[in-house]
Amino acid sequence: MNANMSGRSVLVTGASSSIGSELARQLARAGARVTVTYRAKEQAARELVGDIAAAGGTAQAVPYDLADPQSAGEVVASAVETYGSLDAVVANAVSWPESGPGPMAEPFDQVADWQDHFVTNSVGTMNLAHASAPWLRKSDAGRLVFVGTSVLRHGVLGSAIYCAAKASLNGLMAGLMWDLGPDGVLVNVVMPGWVLDPKFAELDLGEEFNALIAEHASKTPVGRLATPSDVAGLICYLVSPFNGSVNGEVIAVTGGY
């Protein structure tokens, strides 16, 4: 599909790896001028920008801290200053606890810093939406996509805080589509399930990991997990002018599980 993003300015947060990185590549191939953000993985973000430039695309990498209320305004300002506009925003950045990606190691009542974790992922994303909304209103095809999670469907031990934060984005979307809709801005949530990066196939991650992947893949009718490209392809469509009326939706990319 030709997403027809020629000349459009798109901000993708959390774009130094996986879904965000693949999305930036797809958008650039479609002609978008992309601003990608990173927090800790600066080198990966710089390499991504270099790859996009080498392929004939346009991109810049800027630092962004979801936990810093000022950072949202700064990253939006950088996109506008560089490209002169902001047509679409994909809120993909996420903050994990020190234990790394996935649910917290302890149940909710045993987590001491749960408020910070919730505020970073929920209010942090709201700060980005607030900072970008005036610019999206000015676009002739403003688009805003929040990246959620299928953990909302199948909660697991330690997921209460993360689920609550991601669920808040569904509510934010439901209101924002009415606030921004009169100016032609479409707002949606994309809800990935387990996403398997193809590069994992090149690594020996052990029998336990492979068994876990096989278990989750077996729960899908198609028998496989989604890839970053699967998720990015949907988002690329949603933020493009090609999307004329998909609005206020929570769209799962889970393979059917």
Image: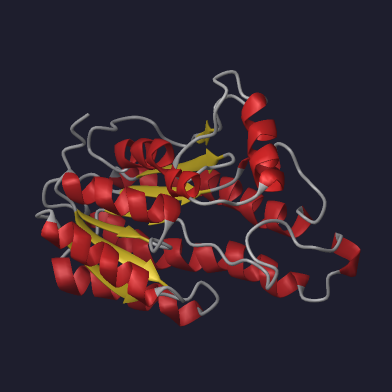
Residue 101 image position (x, y, % from top left): 63, 60
Residue at the image point whose x is 63% and y is 38% from the top: 213
Extreme residue in the top direction: 221
**In the figure, is residue 243 to the left or right of 8?**
right
Give whichever of 139, 55 is nearer the camera. Answer: 55
Give whichever of 178, 128 is nearer the camera. Answer: 128
- Residue 81 to residue 1: above or below: below
Residue at the image point whose x is 39% and y is 64% from the top: 16
**In the figure, is residue 47 to the left or right of 192?**
left
Which colour scheme appears in the figure? secondary structure
**Quadrant of the image for the C terminus?**
top right
Residue at the image point whose x is 32% and y is 62% from the top: 134
**In the figure, is residue 56 to the left or right of 61?**
left
Residue 48 image position (x, y, % from top left): 28, 63
Q: How many marks?
A: 0
**Quadrant of the image for the N terminus?**
top left
User: Quadrant of residue 182 in the image?
Assistant: top left
- Residue 124 to residue 226: above or below: below
Residue 205 image position (x, y, % from top left): 60, 52
Residue 178 in view of the camera: no
- Residue 85 to residue 139: above or below: below
User: Quadrant of residue 252 in the image?
Assistant: top right
Give whichever of 255, 119 is nearer the camera. Answer: 255
Residue 208 in view of the camera: yes
- Residue 213 to residue 47: above or below: above
Residue at the image point whose x is 9% and y is 55% from the top: 56
Give whichever of 161, 171 is nearer the camera. Answer: 161
